Image: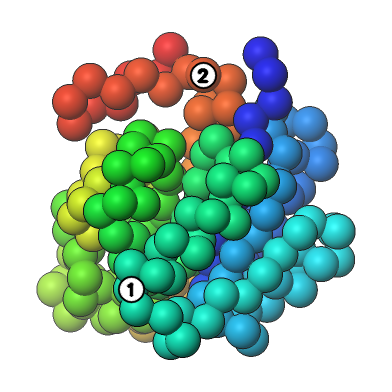
């Protein structure tokens, strides 16, 4: 199988991105990260890319209309021949044109068990605040393909994390993040081996 060209979009620390870098380097993922793009100038994920000589750039969404911003993103990804887009802590919503262009080729990680505590209102620490306030006994992480609705597309992998009485949103976020670090690279690995088959909302692992 040919090596899959991966483009990463991120907005923050990029610890999930780092796990993908590590597994590409280790040869576990049959892919090459050809570009990392951030919509936040200060995102540490850009530094992680530079350290590994991965082409990276900041695109300032505030300087463009939403359509222009997405044109710009698409142009960058297409110029690098990106075949798989990984959202590794990317906080902007992708527009329809972008999703159509990369349908079933965009993977996102969300720090809850979708369909709980997900969608536009739920990002960052808010996800874990909501889970604790609701009193759930388990939460977790979900990797899914991206469609037009936030945190909604076909689910690839999920992993459960127990919520304990003493949990704060921060302590829960920390335990869930370490699970994210397992399942995001695992989903990317499966994708790059051509092992994910989508049938409606279901993703079969072959
Ligand atoms: C993760 O919890 C991810 O699920 C969420 O944002 C966080 C990003 O962490 N979307 P990092 O930038 O990968 O460290």
Number of callouts in the render? 2
> At which x and y percent is residue 90?
46, 66
Residue carrying label 1: 66
Is residue 161 visible in the rendered image? The answer is no
Q: Nearer the viewer, residue 114 or 129?
A: 114
Q: Is residue 167 above or below residue 205?
A: below
What label sits on residue 194 in the rendered view?
2
Q: Nearer the viewer, residue 32 or 188?
A: 32
Which of labels 2 and 1 is toward the front? 1
Q: Nearer the viewer, residue 42 or 35?
A: 35
What label sits on residue 13 in the rendered view?
none
Q: Nearer the viewer, residue 107 or 27?
A: 107
Q: Secondary structure at mark 2?
A: loop
Is residue 10 visible in the rendered image? The answer is yes
**In the picture, residue 162 is in which quadrant?**
bottom left
Q: Is residue 170 above or below residue 143?
A: below
Label 2 CB, ligand 1: below 8 Å? no
Structural crowding at the residue carrying mark 1, measured as other residues with C-alpha within 10 Å and reported as few (<14), some (14–19) or many (≥20): some
**Image point (19%, 55%), residue name:** 149
> At which x and y percent is residue 49?
76, 63
Q: Is residue 194 above or below residue 92?
A: above
Q: Quadrant of the N terminus?
A: top right
Label 1 CB, ligand 1: below 8 Å? no
> At which x and y percent is residue 103?
34, 37
**Image point (26%, 37%), residue name:** 154
**Image point (25%, 46%), residue name:** 147
Q: Relative to 92, is 89 on the left or the right? A: right
């Amino acid at each position: 199988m040919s090596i899959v060209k991966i483009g990463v979009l991120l907005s923050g620390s990029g610890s999930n991105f780092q796990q993908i870098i590590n597994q590409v380097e280790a040869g576990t993922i049959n892919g090459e990260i050809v570009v990392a793009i951030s919509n936040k100038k200060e995102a540490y994920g850009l530094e992680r890319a530079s350290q590994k000589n991965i082409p990276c750039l900041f695109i300032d969404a505030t300087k463009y209309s939403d359509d222009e911003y997405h044109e710009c993103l698409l142009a960058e990804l297409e110029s690098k021949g990106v075949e798989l887009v990984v959202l590794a802590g990317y906080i902007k919503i992708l527009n329809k044109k972008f999703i159509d262009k990369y349908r079933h080729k965009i993977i996102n990680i969300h720090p809850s068990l979708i369909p709980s505590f997900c969608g536009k209102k739920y990002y960052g620490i808010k996800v874990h605040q909501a889970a604790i306030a609701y009193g759930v006994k388990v939460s977790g992480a979900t990797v899914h393909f991206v469609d037009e609705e936030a945190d909604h597309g076909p689910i690839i992998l999920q992993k459960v994390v127990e919520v304990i009485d003493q949990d704060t949103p921060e302590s829960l976020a920390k335990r869930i993040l370490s699970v994210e670090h397992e399942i995001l690279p695992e989903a990317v690995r499966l994708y790059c081996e051509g092992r994910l088959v989508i049938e409606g909302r279901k993703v079969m692992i072959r």
